[in-house]
Image (cartoon, grey):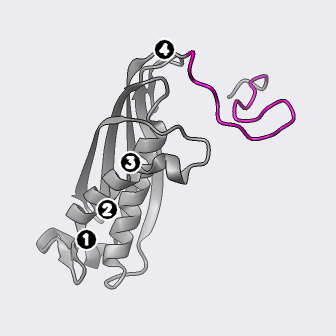
């Protein structure tokens, strides 16, 4: 359970939103790995395994590009995120049964972490799959988006418990 004495760093003393000053933080290598799971359903999963495409084009390749774009634009979408110089973003999508499993690794060398970039990339990749496939099935569900691990920074490393 979280420490109830911790304060929200994005609020000033008068509860006014602010972007946290990270200038005193150390520059370190930072990575984050996030996952999104999209339940496709049997028919759509079979179609993607056979052809990889819908009327809109190649689904998984387009979702990879969408995920990378999402990571690059995170600071524009999430109000208090710092813009980061990303060193790399890898988006891997595997079809497992009736699921598309999206795994994103984001990297930077900087003063703040890349968790939000990895999570945003996974989210946008999942939404791209939905957009590319909605003509086949509107019953897809984005079932989860989560941080699996992160390295670097003052708070240290994190690994999601299974």
N-terminal of the two: label 1 or label 4? Answer: 4
Q: Does residue 6 show up magenta in the picture?
A: yes
Spatial CA distance of label 3 from label 1 is: 29 Å
Q: Which residues are the magenta region? A: 5-24
Residue 144 locus on image (x, y percent):
47, 54
Secondary element at tag 4: loop
N-terminal of the two: label 2 or label 1? Answer: 1
Of tags 2 and 3, which is closer to the observer? 3
Residue underneath mark 1: 45
Tag 2–tag 1 contact (CB < 8 Å): yes
N-terminal of the two: label 3 or label 1? Answer: 1
Residue underneath mark 4: 26
Residue at (43, 56) in percent of width and height: 123
Residue 8 locus on image (x, y percent):
73, 32
Tag 1–tag 4 contact (CB < 8 Å): no
Quarter where residue 118 is shown: top left
Residue at (48, 23) in percent of width and height: 111
Quarter where residue 80 is shown: top right
Side of 88 relative to 139 (left or right): left
Kindly identify which numbered label has been placed on residue 99.
2
Residue 40 locus on image (x, y percent):
34, 70
What secondary structure do most residues of the magenta stretch adopt?
Answer: loop
Spatial CA distance of label 4 from label 3 is: 22 Å
Residue underneath mark 3: 72
Quarter where residue 63 is shown: bottom left
């Amino acid at each position: 359970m979280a420490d109830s004495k911790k304060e929200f760093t994005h609020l000033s003393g008068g509860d006014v939103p602010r972007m946290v000053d990270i200038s005193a933080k150390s520059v370190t290598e930072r990575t984050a790995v996030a996952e999104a799971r999209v339940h496709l359903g049997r028919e759509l999963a079979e179609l993607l395994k056979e052809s990889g495409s819908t009327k809109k084009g190649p689904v998984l390749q387009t979702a990879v590009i969408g995920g990378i774009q999402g990571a690059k634009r995170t600071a524009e979408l999430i109000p208090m995120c710092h813009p980061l110089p990303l060193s790399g973003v890898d988006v891997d999508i595997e079809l497992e049964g009736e699921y598309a499993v999206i795994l994103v690794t984001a990297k930077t060398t900087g003063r703040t972490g890349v968790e939000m970039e990895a999570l945003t990339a996974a989210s946008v990749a999942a939404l791209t799959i939905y957009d590319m496939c909605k003509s086949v099935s509107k019953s897809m569900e984005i079932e989860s988006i989560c941080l699996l691990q992160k390295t670097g920074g003052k708070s240290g490393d994190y690994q999601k418990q299974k």
